Amino acid sequence: MSDLLLTDVRVWGAGDAPRDVAVRGGRIAAIGSGLPADGAEVFDGTGCLIIPGLVDAHAHIDKTLWGTPWHPHQAGPTLIDKIENERRVLKTLGLSAEVQSARLLRHMVARGTTHVRTHVDIGPDIGLAHFHGIQAMRDSHRDWIDVEIVAFPQTGVMIKPGTLELLEQAVREGAEAIGGLDPVGVDRDPKGQLDGIFAIADRHGCGVDIHLHDRGDLGAVTIDMIVERTRALGLKGKVVISHAFCLGMVEPARLDGLVDDLLDQDIAIMTHAPSGPTPFPPVRLLHDRGVRLLSGSDGVRDTWGPLNTGDMLERAFLLAYRSGFRDDSSLEVALRMATYGGAQTMGVTDYGVTVGSAADLVMVEAETAAEAVAFHPMRRLVLKRGQVVARDGRSLLPVAA
């Protein structure tokens, strides 16, 4: 690990004046003007912006088709259609979760991602195969990117006997959180699914992250049930609701009450700004109320769709675009969702562009955070704990098989 000096850079949140950033021992040692090199390798930032490493806090890297020949996307319109199509295609292709995830992570690192929270499929049809593949990949890539695992029941919980036992085994073996999926829409048994998932979280002290696509009042009632269990089991601050389309659909008075409950239990909301006319949470309203917000790529070039790219600056742009953001402060909200919001949810305590923080940094060809979101330009340099892992948009990680 070499020492680095980044000169003539703008530091997000520290004003417009150019500064130098010194990196020693994998951490930010100093921020100031005219810092001495003291033998460190020097990178001229030419006025570029320095932001903390991007955080993809909701991905499905075990199922990506990245690096394989183009596969036609022919799934039907419903959630169940897409799940069944995915299972057929993945079984036919016989791809390795370890190899595929490594291919995608190499690309994500090149785009500035330093932390990933990935949902990993677990169920009676595949057992823990994907989970073990991602664990192996995580171990082999730990110097380049931090990976957190959510044990995810993609095919349902109550409708697939044995799933709860597999989810609990994954938690025993190191999954940081346990996931759920549409307790009403998929399982038709919200009490059964949520009781089972929260019981596992209670026994093991892990986090909870529920995919909630159910819309309108149906989704809102599910949030009520999640809040109730979070409060009863003392899991405040350890629960995420992903997608939460219903928050963009309910009446203002109902939304106000839901937000009060989310704040009371510090339940985070993840949205990736879904495509098309799909409703999604009112980001600026939630931010202004103080709800913890995060974002992620969701699936990247998988059987669900071809459009997500694994670029979290682009994701921040899409969040801003779909939210109708135009002013700089709102654009920064989108970037915070792709950085600090995800880092907080992953429990990263030494994160940011401050002295003493881990040197997980991205140099972006932009003057301000708002410009970085609006144009999501090339990443000049990406550091992971002070190590250069990407340069000029190209990853320096070994090529996956």
Image (tube, rainbow, N blue to C red):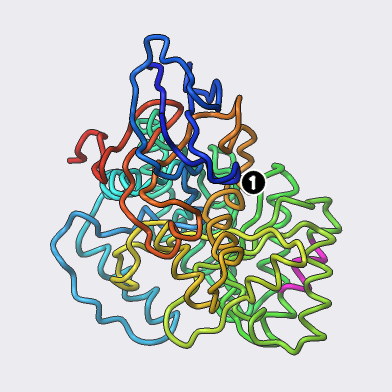
Quadrant housing the N terminus: top left
Q: Quadrant of residue 40?
A: top left
Horizontally, is 296 left or right of 39 in the view?
A: right
Pinpoint residue 43: horizontal percent, then vertical percent: 33, 28
Residue 21: in sight, yes or no?
yes
154 left or right, relative to 397: right
Residue name at image x 32 percent, y 62 percent: 309
Pick the front one: 175 or 255: 255
**Above or below — where is 61 with respect to 156?**
above
From what the image shows, is residue 68 above or below residue 43? below
Residue 197 in view: no
Magenta-colored stretch includes residue 219: no
Q: Residues within 10 Å of mark 1 (few under 14, many from 20)?
A: some
Magenta segment boundaries in residue numbering: 223-229
Residue 315, quarter of the rendered image: bottom left
Position of residue 261 in the picture relative to residue 155 (left or right): right
Residue 213 at x, y = what percent? 56, 77
Identify the residue at image location x=34%, y=22%. Answer: 42
Could you say where residue 18 lies in the image, as x and y percent from the top left?
48, 37
Instruction: Say what amino acid the circle numbered 1 marks.
Output: Gln
Residue shown at the point (40%, 33%) measured from the top left = 383
Given residues 282 and 123, the one toward you in this image is 282
Q: Is residue 144 above or below residue 133?
A: above
Instruction: Between residue 179 and residue 317, name the one nearer to us.
Output: 317
Instruction: Read off the residue under disc 1.
Output: 344
Instruction: Give the structural element (helix, strand or loop) at label 1.
Output: helix
